[in-house]
Amino acid sequence: MTPNKASVSIAVDPETSVDGLLVSASNLLPGVLLVHGWDSDQTHYQVRAEDIAAFGCVCLTFDLRGHGRQIGLKKSVTREQNLCDVLAAFDSLANHAAVDRQSLALIGTSYGGYLAAIVSSMRNVRWLAMRAPAPYPDDDWDLPKNSLDQEALRRYRSEVRPAGSDRSLAACLQFSGDALIVGSELDETVPATGIASFVRSFQNARSMTYRNIDGADHALSDERSQRAYDALLSAWLTEMILGARRPPSG
């Protein structure tokens, strides 16, 4: 099945828009929004979006402000602005005519996973998948993201945080859908303690799956690690989507 692709412009507010690529196939049920991390862009996720769309989804990738064609905003963009980007992209996907609004998935990596977690408390997210979600303290929310104290971030991520103790972890604590968290064994950006902060916060989820990729770093720099993640994500999404399509028993 060859997916259909269309470039889209996503309005964030009357003066701001972000670029996206909508990937869809026929006979669709769920919508899947893929959120890239800091220092990345949507091009890294478009092949993955095509693979997911091929088994029956509408997938949307997009560039957060400060990335892609708007790289010039990188030094000034805030977490609040990027959160608005994700919300606008999510609403754009949810409003697509082929999408079931009760079957929406968010997939985020690192900073994108952090934003996806927050969005799950603000929108109807059924499935939430995060690879190497990056914890951030709530302090300095309106400062440019690029100016945050990196040493303070390392300290924050070096301890396992209490469930619900910051904005993203609080969102995870109230999440009632199905969650997937994937960590990397050799991740120095988001160590095991940072991952554990998210894992322990999913106390009210319908299901929570945690997997760790042996020998992988934060960026999944080698092909073996990338294939391992793709296999994990594909298997999980297939299970979730098939479960959603299966008629109730009895």
Image (spheres, rainbow, N blue to C red):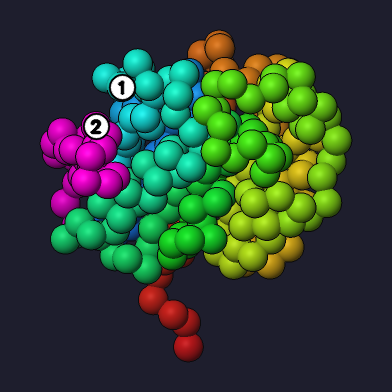
Mark nearest the camera among 2 and 1 is 1
Q: Is residue 53 visible?
A: no
How far across and down, in percent of the image, does residue 92 sit?
A: 25, 52
Query: On the rendered structure, is 100 left or right of 211?
Result: left
Quarter of the view holding residue 33: top left
Q: Depth check: 190 or 31 in front?
A: 190
Residue at the extreme bottom of the image, as rendered: 250
- Type of secondary structure dominating the magenta stretch: strand
Q: Which residue is mark 1?
A: 70
* Residue 3 painted magenta: yes
Q: Residue at x 56, y 49 (%)?
A: 117
Residue 19 tag number: 2
Three-letter code for the amino acid on which mark 2 is drawn: Asp
Q: Residue at x 38, y 32 (%)?
A: 64
Q: Depth check: 88 or 28 in front?
A: 88
Q: Is residue 90 above or below residue 36?
A: below
What SS does tag 1 mark? helix
Measure how far apart labels 2 and 1 are at the Cα level.
9 Å
Q: Residue at x 69, y 22 (%)?
A: 149
What's drawn in magenta, residue-wise?
A: 1-27
